[in-house]
Amino acid sequence: MRQRPELGVRLMLWAIIVLLAGCTSTQAESLPTVRLHNLQPLPTARQEIVPLRVSVAAMISPQGTVESYRPLLDYLAQKLGRPVELVQRRTYAEVNNLIRYHQVDMAFICTRAYVVGHREFGMQLLAIPEVQGQVVYFSKIIVRRDTQRRRFRISVEVSSLLPIPFPTPATSIRYTSFTL
């Protein structure tokens, strides 16, 4: 009976030897050493600077639009510290679709295009112009030459009274409301 405890000790010694044999020096040498007193940030992949994409409906001409907006876009690029890319479209409806489908970051649009965009897909206003300390909107009323002059007040929609061809159906003046 005395052999049984001896056998248990031998088996335990063999198990310890087998377990320790798995920890060879070559395996320990291949593992990196971590020194907690000298920590360095992990290298990161270089990220490309994404340009701010700004859209405008080219009402004058593509070249005229670039010339008109270039100083403002250069200013934005300098202040933001990233490039600014101009994306032109022919109509305000096309510009609205760029905003709707997140193909541009912001756009310069007219009043009517904003109203349509806000109603159709929740377009949000970022900024509006302030002229001489006032936030107002001015429009021209186009009438035939033989029409008598009258004073107009904005209030009632008369877009059907203005059958004037415009470069884009979203142009704000076409839908401006007036009381005669």
Image (tube, grey):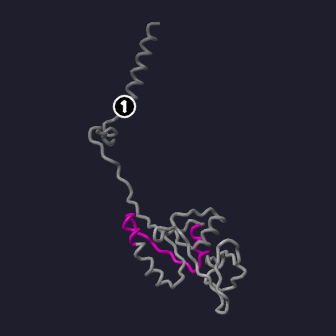
x, y percent for residue 92: 59, 76
- Direction bottom: furthest residue: 146
Question: Seen in the image, is 30 located left or right of residue 3?
Answer: left
- Direction left: furthest residue: 38
Q: Relative to 89, does residue 103 appear above or below in the rendering?
A: above
Of 122 and 21, nearer the camera is: 122
Q: Relative to 118, does residue 91 appear above or below in the rendering?
A: below
x, y percent for residue 115: 63, 68
What residue is shown with label 1?
21
- Residue 146's quadrant in the figure? bottom right
x, y percent for residue 62: 50, 83
How would you rate the neighbour count of disc 1 (Cα within 10 Å): few for under 14, some for 14-19, many for 20 or more?
few
x, y percent for residue 76: 41, 68
Of 6 and 136, nearer the camera is: 136
Residue at 36 percent of width and 33 percent of height: 23
At label 1, the amino acid type is Ala
Asked if residue 78 is among those painted magenta in the image, a careful observer would answer yes
- Direction right: furthest residue: 160
Residue at 61 percent of width and 84 percent of height: 167
The part of the chain drawn in magenta is 74-99
- Residue 5's quadrant in the figure? top left
The C terminus, quarter of image: bottom right
Q: Relative to 23, does residue 44 appear above or below in the rendering?
A: below
Asked if residue 61 is among those painted magenta in the image, a careful observer would answer no
